[in-house]
């Protein structure tokens, strides 16, 4: 049976923007809401149903542990104490952080790696859209931290790749105005 999306639902999707951690405050998502975000992520196209992604929630006392990991990573990267402190505090800013980890089957006989990466990206988009539709702000962050061996070891098991962290919380401001990305005319091209 064909279901037509309501204009309110479509407007909700079209109003999503990334909201940085400094604009996220308590309350963060509840356990039930976090499960809904993951359920939305599980709807991403997944050829072979390999589930090539994992979400690892960082909350409660684990936030302090992640802050220490970020500080240690900053020291290994050669940052001064001000930079170390900044990375430490950034880990504590959002009420909830969710590590995004890919677990790819590089030798799968039917599902090439690029399809698995497409699934990971679709899952990430669905997760962030669900967070937005539940009233939360969020942003995916990565950078040099995902390449730090100590941080990778803390978040990844064998065969896993750390993509970054989703910062989640209640936004203190809503972005306004047009999207900064090029428009539909740039993204949609007729092929002949």
Image: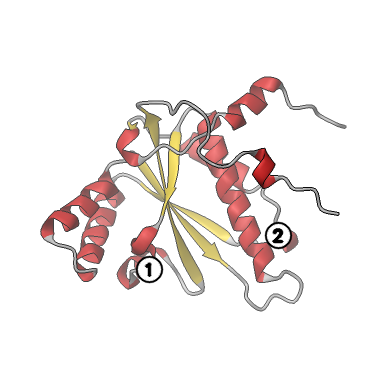
Q: In this view, does 4 lie to the left or right of 90?
A: right
**Separation (CA) of disc 1 from disc 2:** 28 Å
Residue that mark 1 sits on: 147
The residue shown at (59%, 27%) is 12
Which of the numbered marks, if any, corresponds to residue 49? 2
Question: Where 184 falls versus 106 (above or below)?
Answer: above
The residue shown at (33%, 31%) is 26
Question: Which of the colour schemes (rainbow, by chain, secondary structure, one colour) is used?
Answer: secondary structure
Q: In which quarter of the image is the N terminus?
A: top right
Which of the numbered marks, if any, corresponds to residue 172? none
Q: Is mark 1 on a helix, strand or loop?
A: helix
Is residue 39 in view from this perspective? no
Q: Residues within 10 Å of mark 2 (few under 14, many from 20)?
A: few
Mark 1 vs mark 2, foreground winner is: 1
Question: Where 129 falls versus 71 (above or below)?
Answer: above
Q: Do the residues labelled 1 and 2 touch (CB within 8 Å)?
A: no
The residue shown at (53%, 35%) is 179
Residue 89, image x, y percentages: 22, 47
Residue 74, image x, y percentages: 23, 63
Q: What element carries label 2?
A: helix
Q: In this view, does 120 lie to the left or right of 31?
A: right
To which quarter of the image does residue 21 belong? Answer: top left
């Amino acid at each position: 049976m064909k279901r037509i999306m309501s204009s309110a639902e479509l407007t909700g999707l079209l109003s999503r923007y990334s909201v940085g951690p400094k604009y996220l405050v308590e309350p963060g998502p509840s356990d039930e809401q976090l499960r809904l975000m993951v359920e939305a992520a599980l709807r991403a196209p997944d050829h072979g149903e390999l589930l090539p992604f994992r979400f690892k929630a960082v909350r409660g006392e684990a936030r302090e542990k992640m802050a220490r990991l970020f500080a240690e990573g900053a020291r290994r990267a050669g940052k001064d104490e001000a930079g170390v402190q900044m990375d430490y505090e950034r880990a504590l800013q959002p009420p909830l952080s969710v590590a995004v980890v890919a677990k790819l089957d590089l030798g799968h006989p039917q599902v090439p790696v690029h399809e698995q990466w497409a699934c990971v990206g679709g899952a990430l988009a669905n997760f962030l859209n669900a967070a937005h539709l539940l009233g939360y702000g969020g942003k995916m962050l990565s950078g040099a931290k995902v390449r730090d061996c100590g941080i990778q070891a803390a978040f990844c098991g064998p065969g896993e790749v750390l993509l970054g962290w989703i910062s989640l919380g209640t936004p203190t401001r809503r972005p306004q105005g047009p999207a900064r990305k090029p428009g539909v005319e740039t993204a949609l091209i007729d092929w002949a």
